[in-house]
Image (cartoon, helix red, strand yellow):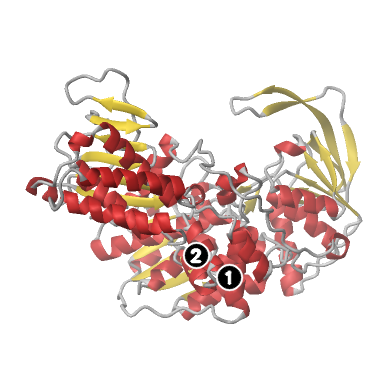
């Protein structure tokens, strides 16, 4: 890392201006090589500031930092709204040699007032580094020299814990602001800047953002997903989900393989930029596993259709259904037939088997979770016959297993059992799904593992099981399990469902197409650009990540679209500074271990209305309903706008919001 000249970090003062440091200096991974051939001169954040080049202008660095702070202020409280603007103006006055050093006293006093009296993260956090600099290194505040004016630029990145936790990096506080102010279309527009599936994500997202929400330190995280759904449903209900076709049109076209969340998002973002897009999918409808694998009681298919197929068609995109890669369709063919780029997003739609005794192919009474949900989908949405009765046993602990057991109840099974080899606390499924399934009558069996199928005339009659017990903890603190000797028993079953995972389908890509695959048959890509080993071919979603969440796929689709547009317009893909900054924050844990700066007023978390558990277990009607307008307003007031600004000072200008 660059040698530190001076700075303040986490309250510690470092002064190496006259030689070696008297104590170990902070080392932040990723700053030294942030931009190739573009030296990092300084870093400014809520935790402090670090100067790496002796001739760096401290006043210019803070002038640019506070300029962004003033721009980000929501304006709800006077200290932040007026104070950040006043700090910006005074800093620039001094930087441009229009005021004497006495102005620095006023700047410090205003900064302290803003930090101590503001209501949200921008006002509370952005003055901290400035105050520390004025207290410990006031002699470094000097007007900008001609050289510094030319060879010093700042890239400032605005984020929050909830934003960084989201794989798609949606500006959560911003769309919450929109709902709070009654600007529902604006709120939805914030989400649509990232992806089109706002209503779908507002129903089934696993809510990484809420896991990172600092409001949880008070009483409970903000209902971010519910607020997103509220904004989306306002537009859908009032028929306001429309998109204007871009004024600029490009003559280059892109082929997208897979109409799931990653493929749809990539197509959507490219269409908005004026590119022609054709989407190829093996199924007869858009949505991918979001359509096939998530039952209608969680995600109604009319909502999904509006946010996938209807949106793409409205923007001018074309669908070609019944077209599977590897079945008469190849990457070679697409590139030879005029497509400037190809995006692979064919997902992971193959179920995983147990690997136990008597697990023969095509047994009656045995199916994988993915195949079971596909049969349910065909029955509910297309009216295809699928009879289910008797006892159903589902093995697994994730959300696919939850979808299987809850769907089996709705399909008429007499008894539905869920088996999991660990404890309930270890289950990766959403806690709400676990509770909902139990309320609907699903029977749980924990610390239980299958060892074989009991088969008679190629039909499964029972599942052979063994009891498990917990042992020592692993490196992540999770308890391991082992089989209890002599505890084997059988559980009669009319249908056994293996809901233990999904795989990327094999033999999709031809060996000679120049696209590298890893040991799990996933496409190898550059993690920052999503380029494959073949020029002009990009990939994302489950075929790269292995089975992940819907929002992971949305994030990959968005990133791929940026890279593809860059490739088509410039002939090469550049790495966005935003992505580099996200890695710096992640690797150094800069948004972790935060506490609430000030006490908050107790506000209970919103609860979405739901159908009665007994009644809903008999049909596929949507279980969770939208919150009311009044409840949405109340919930937005719980958001503390925990924004943070991170500014990197470099020798030359970076792309993005550089200055």
Res 243 label:
none
Q: Is residue 473 found left or right of 618 in the rendered image?
A: left
Residue 65, horizontal then vertical, whole percent: 29, 49
From what the image shows, is residue 48 above or below residue 269?
above
Q: Quadrant of residue 204?
A: bottom right
Residue 36, horizontal then vertical, whole percent: 23, 42
What residue sits right under mark 2 in the picture? 191
Q: Quadrant of residue 42?
A: top left
Image quadrant holding the N terminus, namely: top left
Q: Earlier in the sequence, mark 2 or mark 1?
A: 2
User: Is there CB contact under 8 Å for labels 2 and 1?
Assistant: yes
Q: Is residue 434 found left or right of 279 in the rendered image?
A: right
Residue ID at (31%, 78%):
248
Mark 1: few, some, or many residues within 10 Å (few <14, many ≥20)? many
Residue 79, horizontal then vertical, whole percent: 41, 54
Image quadrant holding the C terminus, namely: bottom left
Q: Secondary structure at mark 2?
A: helix
Q: Is residue 651 visible?
A: yes
Q: Secondary structure at mark 1?
A: helix
Res 232 label:
1
Residue 349, horizontal then vertical, whole percent: 61, 55
Residue ID at (15%, 42%):
142
Measure the C-alpha gap from mark 2 to mark 1.
Answer: 9 Å
């Amino acid at each position: 890392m660059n040698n530190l000249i001076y700075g303040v970090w986490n309250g510690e003062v470092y002064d190496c201006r006259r030689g070696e440091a008297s104590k170990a200096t902070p080392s932040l991974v990723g700053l030294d090589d942030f931009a190739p051939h573009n030296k990092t001169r300084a870093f400014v954040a809520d935790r402090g500031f670090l100067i790496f080049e002796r001739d760096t202008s401290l006043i210019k660095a803070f002038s640019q930092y506070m300029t962004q702070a003033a721009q980000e202020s929501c304006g709800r409280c006077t200290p932040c709204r007026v104070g950040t603007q006043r700090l910006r103006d005074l800093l620039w006055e001094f930087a441009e040699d229009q005021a004497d050093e006495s102005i620095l006293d006023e700047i410090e006093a205003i900064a302290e007032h803003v930090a101590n009296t503001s209501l949200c993260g921008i006002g509370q956090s952005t003055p901290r580094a400035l105050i520390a600099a004025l207290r410990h290194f006031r002699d470094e505040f000097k007007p900008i020299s001609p050289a510094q004016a030319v060879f010093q630029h700042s890239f400032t990145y605005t984020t929050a814990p909830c934003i960084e936790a989201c794989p798609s990096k949606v500006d959560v506080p911003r769309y919450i602001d929109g709902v709070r102010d009654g600007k529902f279309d604006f709120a939805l527009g914030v989400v649509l800047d990232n992806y089109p599936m706002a209503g779908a994500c507002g129903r089934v997202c696993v809510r990484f953002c809420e896991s990172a929400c600092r409001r949880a330190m008070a009483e409970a995280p903000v209902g971010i997903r519910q607020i997103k759904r509220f904004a989306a449903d306002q537009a859908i209900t009032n028929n306001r989900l429309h998109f204007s076709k871009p004024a600029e049109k490009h003559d280059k076209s892109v082929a997208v393989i897979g109409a799931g969340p990653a493929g749809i998002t990539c197509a959507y973002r490219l269409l908005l930029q004026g590119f022609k897009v054709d989407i190829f999918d093996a199924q007869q409808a858009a949505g991918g596993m979001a359509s096939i694998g998530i039952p209608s009681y969680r995600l109604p298919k009319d909502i999904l259709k509006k946010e996938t197929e209807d949106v793409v068609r409205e923007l001018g995109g074309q669908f070609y259904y019944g077209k599977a890669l590897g079945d008469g369709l190849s990457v070679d063919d697409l590139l030879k037939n005029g497509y400037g780029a190809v995006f692979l997003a064919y997902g992971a739609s193959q179920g995983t088997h147990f690997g136990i005794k008597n697990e023969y192919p095509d047994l009656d009474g045995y199916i994988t979770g993915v195949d079971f949900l596909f049969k349910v989908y065909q029955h509910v949405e297309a009216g295809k016959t699928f009879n289910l009765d008797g006892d159903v046993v589902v093995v697994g602990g994730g959300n696919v297993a939850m979808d299987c057991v809850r769907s089996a109840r709705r399909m008429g099974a007499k008894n539905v059992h869920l088996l999991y080899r660990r404890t309930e606390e270890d289950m990766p499924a959403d806690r709400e799904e676990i509770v909902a399934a139990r309320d609907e009558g699903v029977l749980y069996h924990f610390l239980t593992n299958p060892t074989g199928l009991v088969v008679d005339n190629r039909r499964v009659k029972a599942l052979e099981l063994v009891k498990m017990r917990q042992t020592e903890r692993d490196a992540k603190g999770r308890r391991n399990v082992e089989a209890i000797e002599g505890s084997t028993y059988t559980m009669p079953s009319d249908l056994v469902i293996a809901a233990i995972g999904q795989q990327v389908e094999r033999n999709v890509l031809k060996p000679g197409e120049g696209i590298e695959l890893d040991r799990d048959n996933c496409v190898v890509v550059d993690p920052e650009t999503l380029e494959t080993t073949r020029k002009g071919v990009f990939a994302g979603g489950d075929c790269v990540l292995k089975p992940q969440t819907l929002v992971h796929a949305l994030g990959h689709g968005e990133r791929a679209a940026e890279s593809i547009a860059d490739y088509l317009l410039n002939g090469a893909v550049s790495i966005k500074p935003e992505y580099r900054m996200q890695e710096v924050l992640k690797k150094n844990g800069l948004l972790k271990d935060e506490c609430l700066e000030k006490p908050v007023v107790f506000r209970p978390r919103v609860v979405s209305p739901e159908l009665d558990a007994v009644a809903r277990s008999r049909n596929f009607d949507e279980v969770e309903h939208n919150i009311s307008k009044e409840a949405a307003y109340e919930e937005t007031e719980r958001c503390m706008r925990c924004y943070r600004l991170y500014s990197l000072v470099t020798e030359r200008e970076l792309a993005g919001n550089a200055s």
